[in-house]
Amino acid sequence: MKMENIQSHAIDFKDVAKQMETSIENGLTGQETQKRLERFGRNELTKEKGKTALQIFIGQFKDFLIYLLIFAILISIVIGIYESIKIPGEWPSEYTDALVILTILIVNAVLGFYQEYQAEKSLESLKKLAPHYAIVRRDGKVMEIGVEEVVPGDIVLFGEGDKFPADIRLYKEFSLYVDEAILTGESQPVKKQLNPVDKKLILADRTNLGYMNTIITRGNGEGIVIGTGMHTEIGKIATSLQQEEIELSPFQKEVNRFGKLLGIVILIICAAVFVTELILILSLGSPDPMDELIEAFEIAISLAVSAVPEGLIVVITVVMSIGMRKMADKNALVRKLTAVETLGRVNVICSDKTGTLTKNEMTVVKVFIGGNEYNVEGVGYALEGKIIGDKGKQVQITDYLKKYLEVCMFCNNSNVSLRNDGTSDTDVVGDPTEISMKVLAMKMELGTKSEKIAEIPFNSDRKMMSVAVEIDNKLYSLIKGAPDILLNNAGYGVDENQVKPINDVREKILEKNEEFAKNALRVLGVAYKPLDEGYKEEEMEQDYIYLGLAGIIDPARDEVKDAIEEARMAGIRTIMITGDHKITAIAIAQEIGLTESSEAITGIELEEMSDDELRERVKTVDVFARVTSEHKLRIMRRLKELDLVISMTGDGVNDAPAVKGAHVGVAMGLKGTEVTQEASEMILIDDNYATIVNAIEEGRGIFETTKGFFRYMLSTNFDEIFLILTAYILMKLAPNIFLALPVIPIQILWLNIATDGLPAMVLGLTPTDPDVMKERPRKGFTLLPEIKGPVLLLGIYTSITDITLYLLLWGVLIPGWAQAGVPGLIGFDPTLPFAVWPAANFYAIALTQTIIFTNLVVCELLFVYTCTSNIKPFYLFPNKHLFWATGLSFGLQLLILFTPMGLAFHVVPLFHPYFWITLILAAFSVSVVDELRKWRIRKKRGMRILRKS
């Protein structure tokens, strides 16, 4: 016996029983059951072994920049040991440097570990969906067993409320309806039948099969198990979830690319400095070569620490978290941090139709009665709107229209009640089509009361329903059903407010039915008949009066059309991928402005295409109808092969692989399954397409913020590298004039973490540029190219400013202040040998480093304001949080300068006003230069900027 390649839906159930080697009457024997359990395994979903918590934590350190910082820690410790041996009893500053860097690495690792450890629980949710027990027939006896013990060939019995324990070929059913939404995404229960169907049909149309974990909403039946565990349709989805690799987001790729590039540059510079120092020692000699080598190591570490933006990863995490909070306020719950920025790159949105582009609330929009067609105002289940006639006026309720509304109201088993919140919203229970008809009657404020006496229920064979009711002491049969079926037993029809023989109105009804159907409306016929006392049941559906038709549709959301147009203006294409029928999909797509074309590809057509053919078609086709989860996955993969950034929506379990594989997988919050939600990057709390567009706008704003803080942090890092390299060269050329580096590693660390970090974080709270959705989506790696120019310009300018300040301090200001009698500098003489240096020389070094250090702090705290926008003036983007952040950072700097904390940072208090005037003048010019740069770009582009009122 083989489970594979059996087209169970395409052959008679008796042939299925033969191929599965089972007996419908008696089921499997106990012995055969055991053999099959050993052969096919337990009926459960399996999971590949994942990473342990320790492996995930260690993985956070596998990064080129991290390796560089670990190397810096090791060198600092080695130098610290050497210094502690050389000067016993003193805590080397290198130990402090190592501890600070190590703390940063641990904080970063913990943040990364938390994010990764929370992910990937999709399969566990799949397991939770499974039932615990199954009713089977074995050895001729009906028994209850654990669902994991079900094997292929088992005979399973099931009823209303049960879940199918495996994939099953039905051979017996009584009014069986099954909710297959988790597999197909369609909310309407599917009526099951027993006959073979075409083998090419998609899952949703294989009406003689029951699928594992789908729910029986009505009826009962029996069937043959044709697939268990990972061999079921739900198992195939579980396999896809495991096989679908989680691709790095474009932003992660770009940051990694930047890290490797920066790491290589740092290694080259550090190696060049160290080799140069080694050559000088070997060629010129040195009285203390070990001290010279230690100095070379310290310079190399300073360069490494200067170049690596240690706070960058933490800043990225915080800014993305701020973005997550902003999106949550707009009904978009982002589950994965990197998706915040990736959303800003999306250029294709693949959206489901039902509930996302539409309201998922069936609504009567057309009424045809007496030969006249009327529109119905309002959408969804809210009691808003009336039936509108000519010239936009509400129609008068005639006797026949009243009867039409009574059919809608009373030939109906749904429950619709107005909420007690002062709105027109309702609470509903029942079939969506019946709800729509009852809502129509309630909109027209039908005050009629009735008493139901009898009912002939709807079924798929009759395709009609009728009830006997008493209204105003009179008996009526109220009937609704398929328009063509109702014509068969109708005796009369209403035309121009008159009752005529049915043959006189038949053609009008059929023409209008066809017209409604072509416009993707679901059409129901409406009829009634007066009944006599003592009527017979069969008389309820004979010679009745055909009143007219109701045209019903799941209407588009009000805001969707504008959202699609906004997305189009932003260069974002929307593709509808739905399990619904082609004609309905095209009609909705045209109504909401998604496409003007009548072209759509169905799932069956898609299966006939090669990957190359499909790749060409997805470039132009915007509507895919009657598709399965496998089709959705193929469409997504072909789009990704075109280097497009894809957002894919989904709600059912069947959507999970495609949602997981997209750059930004989007799950529904209201009707989405837990499996799909856990496979996604973002959850729509309101299931609304417009929310995706809002999230993309926020994502683009985050990218602009990202450019701002990258420009901010890298400009200052570039400045620090250039400053240290230039100072190193000057120290070698004129050792008696330039006595030390302008800044030391611990000061650079403070700059990169505390001074840079806090303001950079609150840049994420800067208001989004209102013009951000007027730009085209970004392609490829754009972050570094877009900020390269400003970083180089500002880095070079800032470093020239700092070098000039460094030269002025050593060559002019320090000697001048010494001669002017500034406390601490009296006796300054750099020409003396190091062994007999006066205290003033050491103070001069500390003062120079303190002024340069504080100048860098003030420079960065002013510069961050210009980074609120990359082109527009800073005053257009007020950010009160930035004011407090820069104030706090400056306060911390003052704390270092004027408290004992300064000892750890090797600084001296800056009491003299000369010092502050000097450093502030140097720092302020950098922000001016950046605003001039932005002004030049605006002028070149012809942009006019109006000051906010």
Image: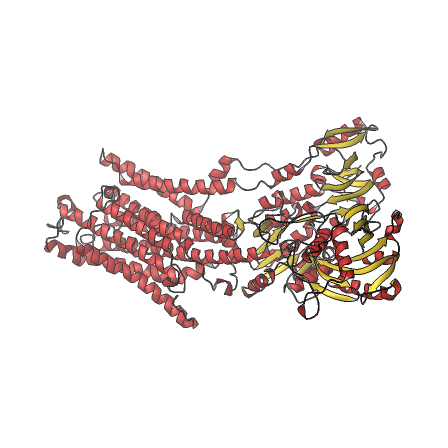
Colouring mode (rainbow / by chain / secondary structure / one colour):
secondary structure
Question: Residue at horizontal 29%, vertical 51%?
Answer: 890
> Dividing the image into 4 quarters, which one contains the N terminus?
top right
Q: Is residue 63 above or below residue 498?
A: above
Q: In this view, does 503 lie to the left or right of 775?
A: right
> Dividing the image into 4 quarters, which one contains the C terminus?
bottom left
Front-most of residues 183 and 477? 477
Q: Can residue 5 be seen in this view?
A: no
Front-most of residues 882 and 51? 882
In this rendering, the count of numbered labels is 0
Residue 151 placement: quadrant: top right
Front-most of residues 197 and 850? 197
> Percent from the top left, x then y, of residue 901?
25, 42
Question: Residue at horizontal 45%, vertical 50%?
Answer: 322
Front-most of residues 336 and 922? 336
Q: In this view, does 321 lie to the left or right of 88?
A: right
> Percent from the top left, x then y, of residue 248?
53, 49
Q: In this view, does 33 lie to the left or right of 318?
A: right
Name the outermost residue toward the top. 31
Residue 899 placement: quadrant: top left
> Percent from the top left, x then y, of residue 476?
82, 52
Q: Can residue 469 be seen in this view?
A: yes
> Percent from the top left, x then y, of residue 375?
70, 64
Name the outermost residue toward the front. 473
